[in-house]
Image (tube, helix red, strand yellow):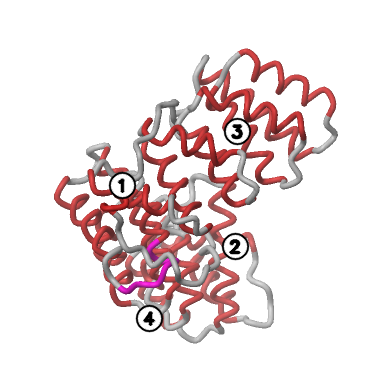
Amino acid sequence: MDEIEDSINFSQVLSALTDINTPFPPRLLRGFSDLTHRNTKDLLPVWDTLPESRKIGILEDLDDLIEKDTLVNFDELAKSVISDPSAKVRVAALNLLWECEEPRIVPILLNLLDHDPDEAVRASSASLLGRFILLGELDAISEKLKDEIVNRLIDLHQSKELPRVKQRALESLGYSSNPQVSKLIRNAYHSNDIPWVTSALCAMGRSADEQWAAMVQESINSQDAEVQYEAVRAAGELELASTREQLLTLLDEGIEDTETRLAVIWSLSQIGGDEVKEKFEELLSRTNDEEEIEWIEKALENLELSGTGGMEMLDFSPEEDEEFDSDEDVDLDFDEEQDDDVED
C-alpha cells in the first residue's frame, strides 16, 4: 500500500514538472527526497525535456528547503542530474550535495574536476571535495581515499587550471594535515592578490593550526572587506582568544557590511568569555534589527553550549608565525585575473 501511495505521489511530481507554464508547487518539492531507482528512471526522460530555467529553479528551491527541513535528502536527485548538458544545472545539482558524506560520489567529483568544460562546475567540485578531506582526517573514510583527494588537489596547483578552481581547491586543502599544504597557504597569503589571500584565510580557519595566528590577527584590520570577513571567520574557527578585543572593538565602532558584522558576532560566540556575553546582552537591549536579534540569540545559545570556549567549527590560538621562505614558493598563477566566487 505504501509503495502504491509513493508511486502516486511521484506521479504527481512528474505531472507538475511538465506543466512548464505553472510554477512548480512548493508542497510537491519533498517528492524529490530519497528517490528510489524506479523514481530516478521515471524522472530522467521528463527532466531532459525541461527548459534550463525550470531545472535551475527547482534545484534552487530544493536547496532552500534543505535549510528549513533536515529530514529531506536530495542526494539521489542531484547525482542523477549532475551530468545535465547545462553547466548552470550541474552547479545547482552540486549545491545539493554539500551535506553528502557518501564516498561513492568522490569519483564523480574528481571526474568533474578533471574533465568538466565549465570553470564553475570544476570549482564547485573542488569545494565539495573538502568535506571528504575533513571526513578523512576524522577517520570517517579510508586514508587511501583521503590521500587520493589531497594529492589530486595539490597537483592541481602545478597545473594550468584557472585561478578560481585552484582557490577553491586550496580552501578544501585547509582541512588536510598534509605538510605540503601549509606552504601553499603561506604563498597564497603573501601573494597580496585579494582572491588568493581570502582563500588562504579560509584554509587557515579550517586547519586547526595555531601557526596562522599572526596572519589572521593582522587581516582582521584589513581595509579590504573580503579579506576582513574571512579573517573574522578564521578567528572564530580557530578560537583565537587574542582577537577577542579586536572583534569587540569592531562591534563598538560599527561595521557597515551586514555579513561581516554577523560573522563578528558568531566568531565571538566561538571564542567565548564573560566580556562577550555582556556585549551580546548589551546589543540585544538596544538593537531593533530582527536579523541581528536572531543572530545574537543564536550566539548566546552557542556560548551556553560551548561553556567558556567556542564551538569546534571555527578554532584558533595566537602564536608567532614562521617567516615566509621565498625559496619554497609554489606557482599559483597569482597574476591571473580575479574571478568571482562560485555560488554556494
Tag 2 near tag 1, CB within 8 Å: no
Range covered by the magenta-colored residues = 160-166
- Look at mark 1 in the image and give the residue it sits on: 325
Instruction: Tell me the crowding category of disc 2: few under 14, some 14 to 19, or many 20 or more residues within 10 angstroms, Cα based.
Output: few
Q: Which amino acid does label 4 sit on?
A: Pro
Instruction: Tell me the crowding category of disc 1: few under 14, some 14 to 19, or many 20 or more residues within 10 angstroms, Cα based.
Output: few
Using the numbered discs, state the Cα–Cα distance from disc 2 to disc 1 in whole angstroms. Answer: 47 Å
Q: Which amino acid does label 2 sit on?
A: Asp
- Look at mark 3 in the image and give the residue it sits on: 266
- Look at mark 2 in the image and give the residue it sits on: 61
For image coordinates 37% across by 52% down, the residue present is 187
Sequence order check: which comes first, mark 3 or mark 4? 4
Using the numbered discs, state the Cα–Cα distance from disc 3 to disc 1 in whole angstroms. Answer: 34 Å
- Relative to 282, residue 119 above or below: below
- Relative to 121, residue 63 above or below: above
The mark closer to the camera, 2 or 3, is: 3
The mark closer to the camera, 2 or 1, is: 1
- Look at mark 4 in the image and give the residue it sits on: 117
- Relative to 195, residue 267 above or below: above
Q: Classify mark 4: helix, strand or loop.
A: loop
